[in-house]
Image (spheres, grey):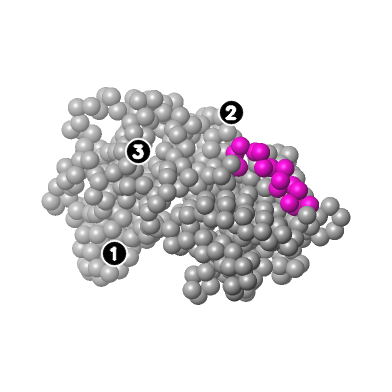
């Protein structure tokens, strides 16, 4: 369960407010795609570049002596006059992994013609960097050094690979891309990971593994499954790419809009899952939130004129800007109405506002532009009491017009319940919620019960509110949200 209906929300889990800036697309999460259980993973560190799951193992490592040669000949290398501090090298490699992994892998995959081989060669390059940079100094352009080392390694392997002719035609015999406005190799990798021939969970897993550089174990924790299960899933996805001959290229102009939408949906799903973890002791999976933001920024660099990309990045920035205020010092959920807004990240909000204005220039607006606009209304409110709820209802009306979904309808009902005036208020909000009771896609959906519970509580219907809170608890696996719902039940009983 997330703090409200189906999208990242800072509004109360128990009030199911739309106040977190949710915009009501499909409310799936990584946990709901692949079961429950597990614990939060950690962000990538230097250990993340040395995964122990390489199918070729030591065979993919460079021969002795090649490290120094690579350091001396790779672009951006510095002279060997002074050795570098090992701690500075470790930090530089970790930073290069966080910032440059996708770029290095994408460029290497173009040469290798095989995602497994490309991964192994990139891992090898990062491993060599730990030694080479300590011996020869940290290069001025780490990405260029790593790319050269990885691609050279791939070429060495391919020269000895009897299967060369089977690998290269798919990738290298493709005609040149018809347009030059999308030159970055990372786009090829993004569109390959998010190809519609792959299942959604496979798209997300490959995106986290290949574009974000997470280890298989870290991806498994994101999905709340075992590492062995995730390793098999990633392997099947890669095999399908090869068997289905999914081309490693940017889609043609005609299919580009639809394919971009699929990529954005994957990034949105990663963010949604991180913003409120489906299960576990923490409310927020900061590793997933940070990865989603990085992916959105990457897409913004690669597709600067795309309104959907601008809208999604704005939505992530504006929603995550409230992170520091969402839990108290003891890790308990803090409702939006009770949050200290001085803790909100004003720089992120300012950037998000600029992106919203840009994204809304497109007609009709994308769903991500509307999601971001809703989040911006909350960011603009100086207090809970000054929130423009009628404006939020109107934005949900637009979202339902262009991208109808039951979760958007649920969030609209919640906003109606918080607005004041004719046609608004908790009674009207409850009526709108009850109109969704027979929606099959909301069956067993905790946030419908949470929203009803809050409306009933505000209307003084304590017994019905209790039943709704208890129903919501049955479908809530996040410990922080569960504790909050239990506290609501205690207050209804007059115990606190």
The residue positioned 31% from the left and 47% from the top of the image is 227
| 153 horizontally vs 424: left or right | left
Res. 319 image quadrant = bottom right
Q: Which mark is residue 233?
A: 3
Identify the residue at horizontal 52%, vertical 69% (top origin): 332
The residue lying toward the viewer, choosing from 193 and 203, is 203
Label 1 Cα neighbours within 10 Å, binned few <14 / some 14-19 / many ≥20: some
Q: Give the residues drawn in magenta, as a range.
A: 428-442
The secondary element bearing badge 2 is classed as loop
Q: In terms of sequence position, does the residue under pointer 1 or pointer 2 come before the other?
A: 1
Q: Quadrant of residue 186?
A: top left
Q: Nearer the viewer, mark 2 or mark 3?
A: 3
Quarter holding the C terminus is bottom right
Query: Furthest-right residue in view?
Result: 422
Q: Earlier in the sequence, mark 1 or mark 3?
A: 1
Q: Which residue is mark 1?
A: 90
- The residue that label 2 is drawn on is 254
User: Taking 229 as reference, is 471 above or below it?
Assistant: below
Residue 456 is marked as none
Measured as percent of width and height from the top left, residue 239 is found at: 33, 31
Q: Is residue 101 visible?
A: no
**Structural distance between the alpha carbons of marks 1 and 2:** 44 Å
In x, y percent, where is residue 67? 19, 53
Q: Earlier in the sequence, mark 2 or mark 3?
A: 3
Q: Are marks 2 and 3 in contact (CB under 8 Å)?
A: no
Q: Where does residue 89 sit, x and y in percent of width and height?
A: 28, 65
Residue at left offset 59%, top offset 35%:
257
Question: Mark 1 near mark 3, Cβ–Cβ under 8 Å?
Answer: no
How crowded pointer 2 is (Cα within 10 Å; few <14, some 14-19, many 20+) is rated as few
């Amino acid at each position: 369960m997330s703090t409200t209906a189906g999208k990242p929300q800072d509004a109360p889990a128990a009030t199911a407010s739309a106040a977190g800036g949710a915009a009501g697309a499909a409310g799936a999460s990584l946990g709901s795609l692949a079961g429950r259980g597990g614990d939060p993973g950690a962000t990538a560190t230097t250990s993340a570049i040395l995964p122990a799951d390489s199918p070729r193992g030591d065979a993919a490592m460079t021969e002795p002596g090649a490290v120094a040669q690579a350091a001396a000949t790779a672009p951006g290398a510095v002279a060997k006059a002074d050795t570098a501090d090992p701690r500075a090298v470790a930090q530089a490699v970790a930073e290069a992994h966080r910032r440059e992994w996708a770029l290095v892998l994408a460029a290497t995959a173009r040469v290798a013609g095989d995602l497994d081989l490309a991964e192994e060669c990139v891992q090898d390059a990062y491993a060599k960097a730990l030694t080479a940079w300590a011996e020869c100094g940290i290069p001025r352009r780490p990405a260029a050094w790593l790319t050269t080392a990885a691609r050279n390694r791939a070429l060495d392997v391919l020269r000895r690979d009897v299967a060369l002719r089977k690998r290269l035609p798919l990738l290298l015999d493709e005609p040149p891309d018809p347009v030059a406005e999308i030159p970055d190799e990372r786009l090829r990798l993004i569109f390959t990971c998010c190809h519609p021939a792959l299942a959604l969970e496979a798209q997300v897993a490959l995106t986290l593994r290949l574009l974000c550089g997470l280890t298989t174990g870290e991806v498994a924790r994101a999905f709340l499954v075992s590492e062995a299960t995730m390793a098999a899933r990633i392997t099947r996805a890669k095999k399908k790419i090869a068997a289905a001959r999914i081309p490693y290229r940017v889609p043609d102009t005609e299919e580009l809009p639809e394919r971009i939408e699929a990529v954005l949906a994957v990034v949105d799903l990663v963010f949604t899952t991180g913003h409120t973890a489906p299960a576990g002791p923490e409310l927020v999976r900061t590793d997933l939130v940070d990865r989603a933001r990085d992916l959105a920024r990457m897409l913004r660099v690669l597709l600067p004129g795309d309104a959907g990309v601008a809208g999604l990045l704005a939505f992530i920035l504006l929603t995550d800007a409230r992170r520091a205020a969402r839990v108290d010092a003891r890790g308990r959920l803090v409702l939006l109405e009770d949050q200290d807004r001085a803790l909100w990240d004003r720089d992120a909000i300012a950037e998000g506002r600029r992106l919203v204005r840009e994204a809304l220039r497109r007609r009709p607006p994308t769903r991500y532009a509307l999601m971001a606009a809703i989040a911006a209304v909350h960011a603009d409110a100086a207090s809970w009491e000054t929130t423009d709820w009628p404006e939020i209802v109107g934005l949900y009306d637009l979202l339902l017009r262009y991208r109808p979904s039951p979760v958007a309808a649920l969030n609209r009902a919640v906003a109606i319940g918080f607005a004041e005036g004719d046609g608004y208020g908790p009674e009207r909000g409850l009526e709108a919620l009850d109109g969704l009771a027979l929606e099959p896609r909301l069956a067993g959906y905790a946030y419908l019960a949470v929203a009803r519970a809050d409306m009933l509580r505000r209307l003084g219907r304590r017994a019905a509110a209790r039943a709704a809170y208890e129903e919501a608890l049955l479908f809530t696996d996040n410990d922080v949200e569960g504790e909050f719902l239990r506290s609501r039940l205690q207050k209804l009983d007059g115990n606190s």
